[in-house]
Image (cartoon, coloured by chain):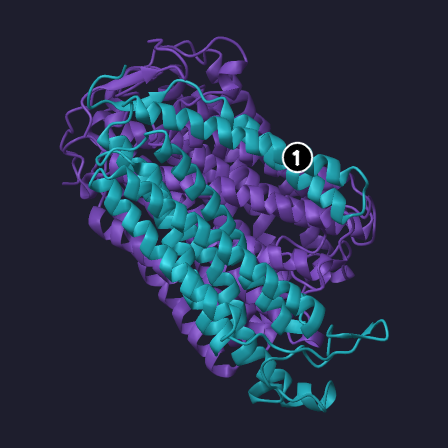
Amino acid sequence: MSAVVAEHDDHHDDHDHGPQKGLLRWIITTNHKDIGTLYLLFALAMFFIGGIMALVIRAELFEPGLQFVEPQFFNSMTTMHALVMVFGAVMPAFVGLANWMIPMMIGAPDMALPRMNNMSFWLLVAGVLLLASTLFMEGGAPAAGWTLYPPLVLQTGKALPFAIFSVHLLGISSIMGAINIIATIFNMRAPGMTLMKMPLFVWTWLITAFLLIAVMPVFAGAVTMLLTDRFFETSFFDAAGGGDPVLYQHIFWFFGHPEVYIMILPTFGVASTIIPVFARKPLFGYSSMVYATASIAFLSFIVWAHHMFTVGMPIAGELYFMYATMLIAIPTGVKVFNWTATMWKGSMTFETPMLFAIAFVVLFTMGGFTGLMMSIAPSDFQYHDTYFIVAHFHYVLVPSSVFILMAAGYFWLPKWTGHMYNEKIGQLHFWMSVISVNILFFPQHFLGLAGMPRRIPDYAIQFADWNMVSSIGGFIFGVSQLLFLYIVIDTIRGGTGEKVSDEVWEDAHKHGLEWTLPSPAPYHTFTTPPDVIPTEHQ
Amino acid sequence: MSTPGAYYIPSKATWPVLATAGLVILLAGFANYLNGASIGPTMMIVGFVMFILMLTGWFALQASESESGMYSAQVGISFRMGMMWFIFSEVMFFAVFFGTLWYTRNLSVPWLGGEGIGAATKELLWPSFDAVWPTNGPGHLGGKIVDGKPSGEFESMSAWGLPFLNTLILLSSGVTVTWAHHGLLAQHRGQLIKGLIATVALGFLFVICQAIEYHEAYTEMGLTLGSGIYGSTFFMLTGFHGFHVCVGAIILSVVLFRSSIGHFKPENHFAFEAAAWYWHFVDVVWLGLFIFVYIL
């Protein structure tokens, strides 16, 4: 492991330890903190753009009948909302956190491959721009749902090849990011930072990175076959030529199921980082958390067809995928138990990050239980393609992944900026969000169980009341997020003006190396490796 | 100069932005071309040129930094891990197409022929379709052109002509690249260069043989991308593999060029190793293709 770090300009030796001046700094940066910031701000922007698309959907569904948009555009909105939120907001936000925090948590000077790190970010921007450009094309943006199932998706207009190439770019970006994270974690740890001493956030990202490398090429292959089916006469997904549209679904979900864990495993990592700090106790069951994460990742590869119970699989397949899916509840249960046990008899305080983390534990469990309901194949025949599914995955994405991203923002903003956020507005943001998110998504369970299909702009009259409630919740949730935007900007510009200490949160230095650094963290940290403090979980 | 043993962190990166711009212009141009827009080909050429310039510049920079001793052993480990996991991602990319071949041959085509859950499908949709491999499906898609129209008749590619020769070519190229590596380690520059020349030549010979094979398939055998699922899987698998052989051969040419101007030392030759790993990966994929696409 290295003792010192050399700073180099590309062409001449220039021992400049600060950032470049001006806008160019952000374009050619190789610094993990700069790139982390870029990722986080980009994700925040996409969160609002994807959010506006969601509000178009909720506005249209406020009442039965067609009010505001054409059905085709409505379908584009559901598709683009999903793609933007998954690939533009949630995934990049976690990559941003990984960039900022992993080197600081393992005592590394930077990411292992800094130039490639820069390229990962710009490819992400390019991919999302290409995707967004389809909104303005003849035939509209893709409208077949984010799963891009053929044969429906092959009816997309001019947008299809652009959407496919955008998936390729986003895939390359994610793979590069994942390779960088793996190389950093395996090769850049400070002496003494053994694998089983690593913070859980680092562990969950290590495992997530493997998932990314394994499945992003699979998605790339699937959409490549869509491209050749449409433009080069192949018949991968056309039964007339001996292909099978269901094959696409298998390949997609072989990617898609690990993909949803790519969004939830780092969530687990952040929750496991925040809860011990505010419970003032070490994390309960550290090693079981590591093994549970690995088990969930492994299981994610062998359960994909539970997304396709109604497609007409052989009965043996249905049974296998049903039981395999139920197994996931075991390691997930271990995690929920451990978070609860960490809080048990702790001296808890309820600052904003902790509030979001507790809401995550409760509401993620809700989403997990509805998932268990759907794993039962015969029941799933009833739930499939209804709003029950929509309610389920929004519970594991919004009050889970997104809440934890908010928690991470409040938790680390003082470390990043050196300023304290406004706790009162933070708490207001939390309560507004947690109440409205339930008004938004809880009624969708009722709608789904009553038979309302997903991805439709109009619906039968008996679904009117709960849709209206859901839409009201949606608008309150949307507006509440402006508070978060305000807080982020306000904190960057000085926040409460209160000087934050190095450890920011009481006794946080016991929980990780990043709290031993000054606040704000200097541009370069751990250029000489730190002494690894024995963390409490050991 | 870097401090001995330090981890080199460049303070800026100018090539990645150009790489991204080149790539996005190339792909947007390709999409425009597919949509029939006339701007497409121009954009593709501009993007491609930018991308090649970027590759040249970026790799030249890395090579000069490597030769001037800026990379410590620890940096070398990062590079090797990067290459290793990149190859793993490529393995997963090929796995999709091998999986597609397996699924269609063993599941969906037999179902179309009435096996298992497919009894009703056969009865109601294509009662006359018999599931045999190779197939261009119940629609008899593509095939030889008779009287200006596809006839639905095609021949499948035999394993024992050019494909077998290509197997021998790639396997020997695996030997020559290893021989070159031994030359590098033993500081026999001549052996290194000769081994690489042989490897690159065998690589391009493979590509030429495959081009001849494709030409024959299209002009004489009625075997095209449009010949149903057999043609689709055949050309997708061998086509992406052939593309990877080209890329591997170009990488090895660069390594050959660097060897000829005196780069690489027994203890510092990451680029050579990466190229050799990539070449062996391409080799192994071919063995999979030879067995599952050609022989079986």
Query: For residue B23, what is the image quadrant?
Result: top right
Task: Give SS at disc 1.
Answer: helix
Outermost right residue: B147
Q: Give the chain coloured purple.
A: A
Q: In which quarter of the image is the N terminus of chain B?
A: top left
Measured from the top left, where is residue A89 in percent x and y? 54, 38
Look at 41% across and 17% down and name the residue there: A10
Q: In this view, does B55 lie to the left or right of B40?
A: left
Question: The residue under label 1 is which amino acid type?
Answer: Ile
In this rendering, the answer to whether A409 lies above or below A346 is above
Pick the front one: A207 or A412: A207
Q: In this view, does B104 lie to the left or right of A469?
A: left
In this rendering, the answer to whether A97 lies above or below B136 is above
Q: In this view, does B202 lie to the left or right of A524?
A: right
Look at 36% across and 66% down and name the residue there: A327
Q: Give the chain coloured cyan.
A: B
Pick the front one: B174 or A203: B174
Q: Determine crowd level at label 1: few under 14, some 14-19, many 20+ residues with C-alpha closer than 10 A.
A: many
In this rendering, the answer to whether B19 lies above or below A179 is above
In this rendering, the answer to whether A155 lies above or below B65 is below
Disc 1 sits on a residue from what chain?
A: B
Measured from the top left, where is residue B96 in percent x and y? 50, 62
Reading the image, the residue beneath label 1 is: B25
Pick the front one: B93 or B251: B251
Measured from the top left, where is residue A160 in percent x and y? 71, 50
Does residue B190 show up? yes
Pick the front one: A499 or A176: A176
Does residue A132 show up? no
Q: In this view, does B274 lie to the left or right of A235?
A: left
